Image: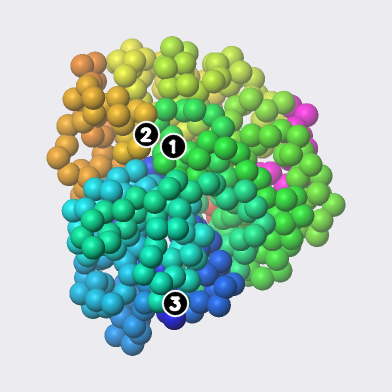
């Protein structure tokens, strides 16, 4: 039995699995990580899988070669909100080519809107809601065994005799060690030098050490629609074993990215993992996603273990807005965290978001001034991005603040983030303009330029990263 797992062609360097899917100004391109986890589990259970990333150079050509020579029984297609019309188009095209194949759509967008997708698009046979490794495996086993009754596959929404069936909700995977290393799948199916994170050294490999985030930020896509709000870590031994495997098998390699929603959510576990990494043979730097509430002692241990950079969602410089979006932090803690990280020698990539219900022209300027005061190594400024299935999307929809008619309008023509929301205080155009101006002012400050030049002169790897990211960014700073 043959299975195709597809990240469909769309705009070049479009990151479907990014938390806000888009083409980035920095050139960042995410791995198709969740597809890779599913492929690894399917292959471990004896299925013949082909994983194709259609957005990397040569990806669409590879897909054409595959469809001209193979006849898959199951086609698993990743989706996202901005690309969903394109993704459905690819699903239809593949269904016409392989009418006997089961077309399964996956990802946060269809997890939130599964019933309507299956109901409205007859070429879609089913949707997996949430994590889909074991949904895919059980579906593949049913197809292989000729079993027509799919009612026992929890998490699956599908069509049967012209009717849409929604099976029970699936429990989140607790034993993450039961899923093969995602890096093994990368090694077999992908070219790791195709992927780039602007804040990280290049080349990079991205993995998960845990899933789920127990915090309740009302805008955050993956915990609300896909990976859940229950924190589930892998064992320390499994993570260290994969890190040693990565270092031994990927060449060249400069860094590993821990793509957990919140890598440091359990501070004791973070310390335990860092101590195990220090004792292991793994000696590459790593970066991670975190919150601004770590102690200085933990930051020092992270640095000793190899932590080079942390991506942190500061979001706003206004406390009222932080409270509204349920960030569960305060401005003073954020400033202390940045000072402590700097003392520990860890760089920070700061993420800022404008356009929440409480924002106005005054508060978004507060956010920019706060970003300047923090003066992190890199920073990004986004208009608020809302996605089906999140609390903030439901709020905007209820109040009539969503001002577009098509999911494609989530992006500009070039694939950059657009703003679909206009509130009484700020229009979508106001927010996009502010983010472009904030980015330009932040990166063109003389003090920032001097700092990056000094960093580049003293560290050749940082110089390479800075040059690669700066080239992509400058093109957009000039254009926008």
**Residue bearing the label numbered 1:** 224
Residue found at x 23% / y 34%: 420
Tell me if label 2 and label 1 are in contact, CB under 8 Å.
Answer: yes
Query: Residue 96 is drawn in which quadrant?
Result: bottom left
- Magenta stretch secondary structure, dominant: helix
Q: Earlier in the sequence, mark 1 or mark 3?
A: 3
The quadrant holding residue 346 is: top right
Total marks placed: 3
Label 3, secondary structure: give it.
helix
Residue at label 3? Answer: 144
Which label sits on residue 390? Answer: 2
Residue drawn 54% across the image and 52% down it: 465
Q: Secondary structure at mark 1?
A: helix
Q: Residues within 10 Å of mark 1 (few under 14, many from 20)?
A: many
Specify few, some or many for label 3: CA neighbours under 10 Å numbering under 14, 14-19, or 20 or more: some
Quarter of the picture holding the C terminus:
top left
Q: Tell me if residue 113 comes above or below residue 335 in the rendering.
A: below
Residue count near mark 2 (Cα–Cα under 10 Å), binned few <14, some 14–19, many ≥20: some
Give the SS element for disc 2: loop
Residue 300 horizontal side relative to residue 454, left or right: right
Look at the image and say whether residue 297 sits in the magenta stretch.
yes
Is 50 left, or right, of 94 in this rendering? right
Percent x, y for residue 70? 35, 84
Q: CA distance from mark 1 to mark 3?
A: 33 Å
Residue depicted at 79% across the width and 42% down the height: 272
Q: Earlier in the sequence, mark 2 or mark 3?
A: 3
Residue 446 appears in the figure: no
Report how far apart the C-alphas of labels 2 and 3 lie in the structure. Answer: 36 Å
The region drawn magenta spans: 296-308
The N terminus lies in quadrant:
bottom left
């Amino acid at each position: 039995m043959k299975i195709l797992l597809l990240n469909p062609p769309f705009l070049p360097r479009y990151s479907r699995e990014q938390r806000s899917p888009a083409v980035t100004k920095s050139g960042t391109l995410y791995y198709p990580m969740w597809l890779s986890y599913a492929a690894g589990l399917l292959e471990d259970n004896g299925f013949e899988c082909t994983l194709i990333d259609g957005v990397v150079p040569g990806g669409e050509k590879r897909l054409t070669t595959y469809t001209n020579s193979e006849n898959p029984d199951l086609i698993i297609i990743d989706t996202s909100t901005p690309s969903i019309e394109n993704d459905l188009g690819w699903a239809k095209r593949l269904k016409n080519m392989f009418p006997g194949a089961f077309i399964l759509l996956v990802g946060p967008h269809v997890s939130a809107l599964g019933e309507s997708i299956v109901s409205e698009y007859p070429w879609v046979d089913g949707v997996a809601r949430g994590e889909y490794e074991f949904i895919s495996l059980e579906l593949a086993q049913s197809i292989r065994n000729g079993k027509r009754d799919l009612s026992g596959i929890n998490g699956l929404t599908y069509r049967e005799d012209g009717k849409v069936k929604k099976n029970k909700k699936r429990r989140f995977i607790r034993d993450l060690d039961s899923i093969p290393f995602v890096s093994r799948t990368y090694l077999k199916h992908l070219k790791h030098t195709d992927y780039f994170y602007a804040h990280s050294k290049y080349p990079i490999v991205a993995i998960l050490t845990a899933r789920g985030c127990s915090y309740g930020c009302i805008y955050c896509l993956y915990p609300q629609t896909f990976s859940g709000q229950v924190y589930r870590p892998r064992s320390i031994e499994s993570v260290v074993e994969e890190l040693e495997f990565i270092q031994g098998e990927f060449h060249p390699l400069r860094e590993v990215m821990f793509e957990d929603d919140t890598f440091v959510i359990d501070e004791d576990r973070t310390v335990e993992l860092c101590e195990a990494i220090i004792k292991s043979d793994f000696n590459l730097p790593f970066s991670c996603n975190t919150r601004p509430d770590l102690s200085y002692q933990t930051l020092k241990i992270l640095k000793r273990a190899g932590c080079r950079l942390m991506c942190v969602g500061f979001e706003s410089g206004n406390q009222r807005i932080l409270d509204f979006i349920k960030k569960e932090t305060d401005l003073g803690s954020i400033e202390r965290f940045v000072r402590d990280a700097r003392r520990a020698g860890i760089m920070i990539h700061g993420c800022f978001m404008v356009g929440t219900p409480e924002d106005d022209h005054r508060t978004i300027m507060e956010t920019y001034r706060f970003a300047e005061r923090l003066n992190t190594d890199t920073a990004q400024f986004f208009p608020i991005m809302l996605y089906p299935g999140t609390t903030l999307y439901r709020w905007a929809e209820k109040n009539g603040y969503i001002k577009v008619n098509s999911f494609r309008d989530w992006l500009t023509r070039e694939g950059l983030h657009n703003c679909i929301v206009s509130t009484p205080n700020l229009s979508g155009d106001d927010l996009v303009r502010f983010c472009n101006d904030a980015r330009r002012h932040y990166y063109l400050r003389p003090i920032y330029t001097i700092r990056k030049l000094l960093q580049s002169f003293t560290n050749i790897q940082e110089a390479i990263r800075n040059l690669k990211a700066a080239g992509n960014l400058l093109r957009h700073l000039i254009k926008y």
